[in-house]
Amino acid sequence: MKQAQFEFSVSTKGRGIYSINKEVEGWMRDQRIQSGLLTVFIPHTSASLLIQENADPDVLKDLDRFFNRLVPDGDPLYDHQSEGPDDMPAHIRSALTQSQLSIPVRNNRLALGIWQGIYLFEHRVYPHNRNVLLHLLGE
């Protein structure tokens, strides 16, 4: 059994959904692990991870618009606004999504469905640098 770890950074332009497939798949292939499990983790409380459709970009736009409507910025319900009106909504969006993904590896490839991709979901309005940690275990 082998294991490997890697960390990379994603520069966001603000709120939105960013594909991280190339970075994840490229690193994973270099590890030459044929069968195992990849864990993808984001150590942030105002950004998250998604596995979502990668064929039609309208899916990502609609998902982003839905979250904007579901968790609006500046709601007077929120007490926590020390970092701006988008901060508490970002925490709520993170709570509704995921900070970690587990993806099986088969034949040195991610066992994602044909229309699936891995995305970083930035919940803050302004640009941020986000770290993504990968841990691969297998043989």
Image (cartoon, rainbow, N blue to C red):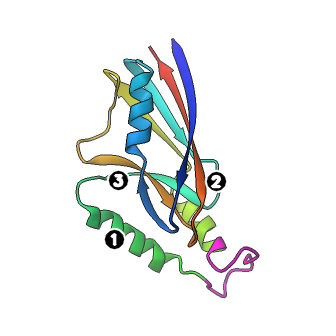
Mark toward the start of the polypeptide (2 vs 1): 2
**Circle 2 sits on which residue?**
44
Q: Identity of the amino acid at label 3?
A: Gln
Amino acid residing under circle 2: His
State the residue at coordinates (38%, 41%): 22
What is the magenta range? 74-87
Which is more toward the observer, 92 or 19? 19
Above or below, comparing residue 95 to residue 69 in the picture: above
CA gap, disc 1 and disc 3: 12 Å
Tell me: residue 74, above or below residue 2: below
Say left or right for 123 vs 32.
right
Determine which quarter of the picture holds residue 81: bottom right
| Residue at x-position 69% and y-position 80% | 78
Query: Measured from the top left, where is residue 80 in percent x and y?
Result: 74, 75
Residue type pointed to by label 1 = Asp
Mark 3: give few (<14), some (14-19) or many (20+) Cα within 10 Å: some
Label 1, on which residue?
A: 62
Q: Which residue is mark 3?
A: 52
- Say whether residue 82 is left or right of residue 56: right
Residue plotted at (34% across, 63% down): 60
Whether 37 is among the magenta residues is no
Q: State the CA–CA distance, disc 2 to disc 1.
A: 23 Å
The image quadrant that residue 5 belongs to is: top right
Q: Secondary structure at mark 2?
A: loop
